[in-house]
Amino acid sequence: MRAVIRISIGLIVLLAIAVPTIASNKIKVAVAGGYEEIRSLEENDVIYVSLSELAGILGGTIDWEIVGHTVSYRDTDFTIKLLIGSPFLNLNDTTFNMTHEAILDRGQLFVPTATFLPLLDRVTSQNIVWQPNDNKIQIDSDYFNVTDLSVQTKANGLLIDIYLTTPLAYEIFVTEGNWLNVSIRDARINRSRILSRRNSQYMYQLKVHQVENNTGQVSIRLRRNVTDWSHKIAYNPTRLQISIKDANFQFDTATNRPVIGPDDKIDVIVIDPGHGGKDYGAIGQNGTREKDIVLEISKKLAKLIRKDKQLKVVLTRDRDKTLSLEQRARIANDAGADLFVSIHANASPKKQIRGWNVFFLAPALNDSARSVEQLENSYFLRESYSDSDDPSIDSDYQDPVASILSEMLMTEFQAESHDLAQMIDREFRRRLDTPARGIDQAGFFVLNKVFTPSVLIEAAFISNKIEEKKLKNKKYQEKVARGLYEAIKRFKAKYESN
């Protein structure tokens, strides 16, 4: 998700006059094994940080509202509303005092570092700590000791694993409505990761509660009655294991799918050059074909990975050929992919639009993401229509089982996919001289068939003459490939060290 700033030029000018420009400095942000630098200001011995830039790192969005000069910072689970020139903010409908007012400078929103970040830390899925002596913000997902959740079917019921970094005291109880509640003492729960595991096949609802005394609770409203169950702490890896037995349990094998995805090693990378064969993809004003460009970038990325010799790389296509959605997914799943990267070039009827994007699989939140989703899915939609006896019916959308499976796949690796998208975003910002359109989410068919963390990148707009020329340039292709390669290495280092 990228920070989206909507504000009129007139308002910028007006506020720029009202608020004097202040000399800016930089603050380091330690995240995902590396460092970013974002703008900061110092006024009357108070250090302010750019929330506009920090939002891009955290994956939130900034929305400017002209009336009253209010600004909203939004993430999946919370909304913070601020008023320029006021120390008060509204966090999920509760008012807090930052002591120092929010500031607008050069079109960016600044907040007092020492008093705002603790409020943000209370609600975000990551641990955020301001370290004034080092002039550094530490963002740490390894802070959590309750890290993940999985639900699997067994011959006689369900097996639920709640992953821990160390054994913790816990209590399990069942309440009305078929809620299985796990209360864990001294818990620091990775809320977004666990909520991303909501699986409609097994559960109606999934909730996470974290209270200030560090007691955490994971609550699952299961589809089957909980009558006979047992629990224990298991090891290698450390986890709380709950077995729910059902003597009459019968699992519908039609909806059962293999568990495929990252194991203890990130060592199989599948690269998917978009389009190919009779599917040209987008075509630039000078006749450049998307399918050709993305194949070149993919080959360069594969060469970098093979040279590394720590990773195995699989290309869904290494030449100009047509591939169906099912074929791409089968190649990835049969290879046991630990990561799936689909490479594309964007297009728009508005020829002036420029920039690169990184997408992960989740419902689209804005018109821009929906338009990219529609563009990239269009060929597969035509493909499904041509295979159907009735072209007016898309069975994949009409079948309720398919709908449930689609929702499962959208959430299964969402946290890791978002993490990989963030790493690619940082590498692209360092290397590419095209505008950054940042991270976004959309429902791409090609990602929704692959059982592993996956992203789709749009390297630039082939519909823009300037960027069409860049896409044809081998040096630019190499920069895109290098950025992807470095992000993959960072992802591997982070997840293999957990």
Image: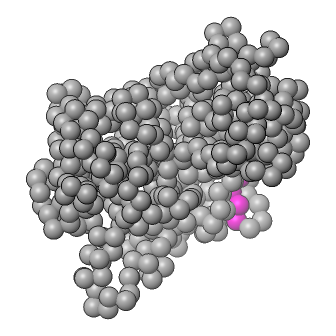
Identify the image's colour scheme: rainbow, by chain, secondary structure or one colour.
Answer: one colour
Q: Magenta stretch containing residue 390, yes or no?
A: no
The answer to whether residue 119 is visible is no
209 versus 135 height, above or below: below
Q: Magenta stretch containing residue 180, yes or no?
A: yes
181 versus 423 height, above or below: below
| Of 255 and 363, the residue lying toward us | 363
Mostly what secondary structure, the magenta segment?
A: strand
Q: In this view, does 428 lie to the left or right of 334?
A: right
- Magenta stretch: give its range: 178-183
**Residue at the location (68% across, 53% down)?**
207
Q: Is residue 124 left or right of residue 411?
A: right
Q: Residue 449, position in %: x, y?
A: 35, 61
- Residue 278: name its quadrant: bottom left
Count of picture labels = 0
Farthest residue to the top: give it. 133
Farthest residue to the bottom: give it. 390
